Amino acid sequence: MATPATGVAGIAMRLMAVDSTSGREGEVIAQAEQLLRELGWRTTRIPVTPGRDNLLATSDNAPLVTLSTHLDTVPPYIAPRRDAGRLHGRGACDAKGIAAAMIVAAGKLRDAGMPVALLFVVGEETTHDGAHAANRFATSSRVLINGEPTENRLALGTKGAVRLRVRTTGRAAHSAYPHLGDSATERLVALLATLPALELPHDEVLGATTVNIGSLSGGVADNVIAPWAEARLMARLVGPVDETLARFMRWADGRADIDVGETVPAVRLTSIAGFETDVVAYATDVPNLSTWGTPYLLGPGTIHVAHTDDESVGIDELEDAVGLYVKLAMAAGDRVRG
């Protein structure tokens, strides 16, 4: 069945017109479901949390290959616009433009007789709860093509990620008499100043472990010695999670407490001849979709503009991605069928 006359750019704009910041993805899932039904797909909701579902689209055959990406986005919402061959706005490259390319590609694969499915998940930008829910869903899929902005190169690996909360405690006192208190903020600032010197794992393919101090908070008032302070960190993993966490624990020992949050392991991925390749530094849903088959990672757009006020993607990149998804699905499908 042919795609709508609006094509890949029109589908992307339709999805981008809906604010789907993580946690409030209900409307975009409804929009995607309506679109896919218009295109002749059977749709199934996979519940995640109340009001939030993943969306699975299938044809008459049990899927061999699944094209998947996420429909949640980071804040703030930025309405879509189109100019000079580019789409601008939240989700342009991460990942509603990718979803549009997958929808068009899946239609072509279905017409060619490939047993294919589309899986759109929620929560990728936060806790990956959509992927966890999808992984509990029974599927015949043996190949997973995950979509993230890789500049249309097939990724050979992705870094993992771990979220950490570093918390210091002190003793409140009137700020005019600092000797009567113990400043938790001073403790935290002093500890964070040593973070660049912390030796963390390095991998010859994935590169260095990197750390971002995402947010800082603490204290109760300007004229009160701070009794508490905390920093939220995200480390990009290139090796075993336990090894990296052990180094953070030694770094903080006796100076702060560390709570470990959501963790996504680093992943080595499979290559296929005929594709340009790359390694990406961000984490994806791939490790949490292990039941959906051998994973591949590819998508239009660059991560360098994702999560920014200038997020955009070239329409030609989206159109190129359609052909690449068809080519990859065919090659990967042939590989698992032997």
Image (spheres, rainbow, N blue to C red):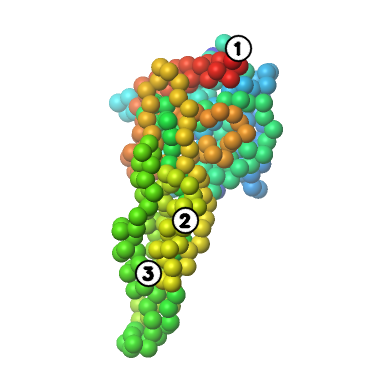
Crowding at label 2, few (<14), some or many (≥20) Cα neighbours within 10 Å?
some
Which residue in the structure is indicated by mark 3? 188
Front residue of 216/205: it is: 205
Q: At which x and y percent is residue 12?
A: 46, 29
Crowding at label 1, few (<14), some or many (≥20) Cα neighbours within 10 Å?
few
Q: Which of the 4 quarters of the picture holds residue 139?
A: top right
Q: Is residue 109 visible?
A: no
- How far apart are the alpha carbons under marks 1 and 2? 47 Å
The secondary structure type at the circle numbered 3 is helix
Q: Can residue 170 be seen in this view?
A: yes
Which residue in the structure is indicated by mark 1? 113
The dot on residue 330 is: none
The secondary structure type at the circle numbered 2 is helix
Q: Is residue 193 above or below residue 19?
A: below
Foreground disc of the pair 2, 3: 2
- Residue at the image point whose x is 58% and y is 45% from the top: 129
The type of residue carrying mark 1 is: Gly
Which residue in the structure is indicated by mark 2? 245
Crowding at label 3, few (<14), some or many (≥20) Cα neighbours within 10 Å?
many
The type of residue carrying mark 3 is: Leu
Q: Which of the 4 quarters of the picture holds residue 288?
A: top right
Q: Earlier in the sequence, mark 1 or mark 2?
A: 1
- How far apart are the alpha carbons under marks 2 and 3? 19 Å
Front residue of 43/335: it is: 335
